[in-house]
Image (tube, coloured by chain):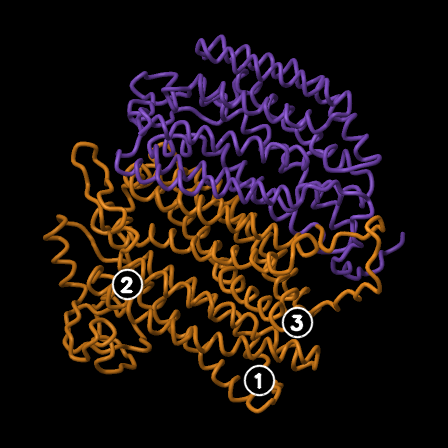
Amino acid sequence: MFGLALTDIWFLLIALLWTGYFVLEGFDFGVGSLLTLLGRDETDRRRVVNTIGPLWDGNEVWLLVAGGATFAAFPEWYASLFSGFYLALLIMLVALIGRGVAFEYRGKVDDDAWRRRWDAVIVTTSAVPALLWGVAFANIVAGVPLDAQHEYTGTLLTLLNPYALLGGLTTLLVFLLHGAVFVALKTDGDLRVRAHRTALRLGVGAVPVAAGFLVWTELAHGKDWTILSAGLAALALVGAVLLVGRQREGWAFTLTALTIVATTVTLFGSLYPDVLPSSTDPAGTLTTTNAASTPYTLEIMTWVALAVTPVVLAYQAWSYWVFRRRLTRDDIPPASGLPARERRPEVRR
Amino acid sequence: MALDLARWQFGVITVYHFLFVPLTIGLSLLVAGMQTAWVRTGDERWLRMTKFWGKLFLINFAMGVVTGIVQEFQFGMNWSDYSRFVGDIFGAPLAIEGLLAFFLESTFLGLWIFGWDRLPKRVHLATIWLAAIGTMLSAYFILAANSWMQHPVGSAVNPVTGRAELHDFGAVLTNSTAVGAFTHTITAAFLTAGMFILGISAWHLARHNEVRVFRSSLRLALVTVLIAGVGVIVTGDLQARLMTQQQPMKMAAAEALWNTSSPASFSLFTVGSLDGSQEVWSIRVPKVLSFMATGDPDGTVEGINDVQRAEEARFGSGDYTPNVPIAYWTFRVMIGFGALALLLALAGLWMQRGGRVPASRWFTWAALAGIGFPVVANSVGWIFTEMGRQPWAVYGTLRTADGVSPSVGPATVATSLIVFTLLYGVLAVVEVTLLVRYARKGPDPLPPPDEAMPAESAPRPLAVAY
């Protein structure tokens, strides 16, 4: 099909799904992490949450589809990766579970203590995955210990090497920046000003860290052409920070999104044609060929993806259009949660 | 050891996930129906019902979504050899489920929740229908994947690659087992949602709260349970026959039928052991098992001993008998609680005839307890389906013991089992508390209609926000 091997098409599609996931959920991770920092009072905290309220769940589906597509197109990759990264994924799952519930339940009881608890959950469970995805993908690109049966032979600590930690710090800072710019784009007044200021500070940290990670990636694992995408990622990031300084948050957001796209392209470009290199036994390396499903399965999946993906993109874009407005303080309705339970009077000492 | 823990984890995670799923599927469609009634009639009662049941639906939906993520990940985490073996077939419906169903559900539900004042009335109505269709599509694809494990079609094991490979995707999607499982699951989902609405409505009616809203809700629930209940029986019957042909061992284990019989009787209850070694005391209905299994009251039903011998001849020596007491009791508890739900709905229909409000004490309490009947039936039904297939993960093709992740040790699995159990326990408390409190609170009054159309610039808050 199109002169490309089916396995390459699926490598591209999976790269596309992860790119979509990082661009979209990237900002909602950032928004969640910055919830208490940007939202000084309850109304502003609700504004922050509501910038992503109708969107975050649809963003998260990109992850589920990326996971499902990996299972379908490259079962060996899915099997080795998910069993190998077991404990890291456990932490990720706990975070994603806590996060989804927290958004939904935060406003269900009109009580400060209740909301503070869920706010803490939102901040933690947004920041932890933002960090862990960078750690995970840096490890995928750099390779992990796999035996000849493609079984992971390392531990959780194997994954916490310097390159991977730098990758984690990169995604954390870039997603936070992406989220801060998104809040600036979707709100007005003080909150928008605070989001600008926060974005600038984050940008100052993100540029050297991301540049360091991109250079390391290019030198250690990159291909000739990935220097272009790595360079583009770095330039876009610098541009985003400059535009934030000029309060052009629409363009700044476009550039933080471009940074994430170009970084993901760099990572997948460096990885290809491997999908999970072995750092120990070369026979353990998984590639687009030895990890793939049969051509028949890939062909069916290709047709389904070609038919359905444009429709999904269209209606998801439409939902972003419907909720395009900036949120003002007047937009936030009075709290509608249940009253706090009556507490027994505290015993005075 | 790691195998047992991984099986426990699969059981805990999957049964827990499925506590929420049927209610999501059933309620999404019923709420869509309520909103349609409002759009068509303009009667505010339907709008208030939509918002009230919609709120409970969303509290439940959140749990279904977050616990669903684990479902997709755990195959790779705990069952990597299974994933390698089946990925060529099993992965496709999972990926398509995400692409076709999860995007639809989540995007349009977001539009539905937050779109009340942003979308034209009919477009807004369409969003809940699309989300509801998403839940149905999701059910179909995941059940097609599971049905392939029960009755692997359209595929063969490739001796060169040592894995099962897909030959005919159409056969996987039109698998008779999938059609049986889907119709049975969907009717059960409506039964679950119907009983949920019934219990809460009966509770409010006994207190004369919002009689107009809850009487309509009660009637809707009773009719839903009645139709769904009949549907569950018809589709269950279809499934039983398919199971007899496709997995005779499971049917034999469901009755603890050790020796082939024609006709075979069905025991309602048994005291004593089910291991076939000693005489047991039981209440038996003649010929019923034969009828359930074959459609003929004098039909032959194969016994466990004979199936065991037949499978040894096919697959080599080994133990092909699942845990018989579990199969036997889960099968009965499933049927029993389903039947109880249906009986309660029949009683309710009688009690509300001619505009009466069923307010008797026993009915209120029975209806409240009845919320749990289908939940129990759904859970044990799946425990039966999955444990009755053992020792196989994919019937006749891959043993469960051969599917577990070789690189994941017992300590790791134990860690995650403990973490998930604790987390799920806490979340269960939070979600049940919220559901109970919102259910007791009853429907909110509608906001007063705007006295005059406010100027564009006048501040007006969002209709719905987190």
Question: First in sequence: mark 2 or mark 1?
Answer: 2
Question: First in sequence: mark 1 or mark 3?
Answer: 3
Q: Quickly name the residue at label 1.
A: B362
Give the colour chain B carries in the figure. orange
Label 3 SS = loop
Q: Nearer the viewer, residue B350 or A99?
A: B350
Q: Nearer the viewer, residue A30 or A58?
A: A58
Question: First in sequence: mark 2 or mark 3?
Answer: 3
Given this view, does label 2 or label 3 mark the residue nearer the observer? 3
Label 1 SS = helix
Q: Quickly name the residue at label 3.
A: B42
Is B114 left or right of B16, judged from the image as shown? right
Given this view, does label 1 or label 3 mark the residue nearer the observer? 3
Circle 1: residue type: Trp
Identify the subunit bearing mark 1: B
Circle 3: residue type: Gly
Which of the labelled discs sits on residue A95, or is there none? none
Is A89 left or right of B384, judged from the image as shown? right
